[in-house]
Image (tube, rainbow, N blue to C red):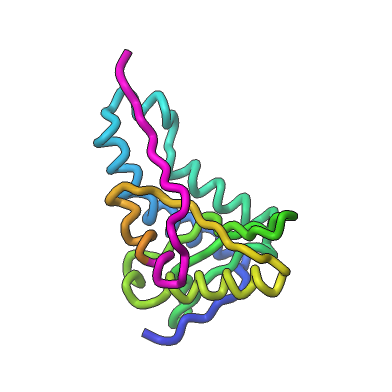
Amino acid sequence: MGEPIIRDALHEELPRVREIAKQAWSPIYAYFREKMGEDLWSREHPGDPLEQKADVVEKHFREHPDQAFVTEVDGEVVGFCTYMLRDNQVGVVGNDAVAPEAQGKGVGRRQYQECLKRMREAGMIYARVQTGLDPAHAPARRAYEKVGFEPVRPHIDYYMTL
């Protein structure tokens, strides 16, 4: 595998970005669906949540191209990262993912390092990222911790049948 190249996305690459987003969130949503049960899942996530996630990612790339980038390896887009620069000088890592075939090879870590570099250059003092505590998010948590993020405010959702 060649060196990852971080760059702006080309318009024609947005379908690939969408594909990576759906691949990345598929196991997460499968886990949620199993834990929640079909009835609660369908009430909380009507429609196709993978398409909805891809829509959110694509919208960010279109509306904030200066706060999004892709990672290319050997001529193919294998990852992406979106982020926000807030007025309070807290940068927020948004949606990010690495294609399954490129996972475990340092691509995610390289993306986060680039994202943090861009935040520093934009004058951010802090960086924030939010992720799940469930097993499906474990790879994301490991990647965030590898670049220096520390958990501060754990979050959990509770449900019950009435």
Q: Position of residue 23 (x, y in %)?
A: 37, 55
- Secondary structure mainly formed by the magenta segment: loop
Q: Residue at x 53, y 63 (%)?
A: 81
Q: Position of residue 124 (x, y in %)?
A: 68, 65
Residue 33 lies left or right of residue 131; in this view the side is: left
Q: Residue at x 31, y 21 (%)?
A: 160
Q: Residue at x 66, y 66 (%)?
A: 125
Q: Which residues make up the magenta segment?
A: 143-162
Q: Quadrant of the C terminus?
A: top left
- Can you tell which quarter of the image residue 143 is in? bottom left
Compared to residue 3, the image places residue 84 above or below, namely above
- Can you tell which quarter of the image residue 87 is in? bottom right
Q: Residue furthest front?
A: 152
Front residue of this view, candidates 25 and 74: 25
Compared to residue 144, the image places residue 38 above or below, namely above
144 inside magenta stretch: yes
Compared to residue 133, the image places residue 17 above or below, namely below
Q: Residue at x 55, y 55 (%)?
A: 94
Q: Position of residue 63 (x, y in %)?
A: 69, 53
Compared to residue 136, the image places residue 122 above or below, namely below
Report the number of numbered marks: 0
- Can you tell which quarter of the image residue 11 is in? bottom right
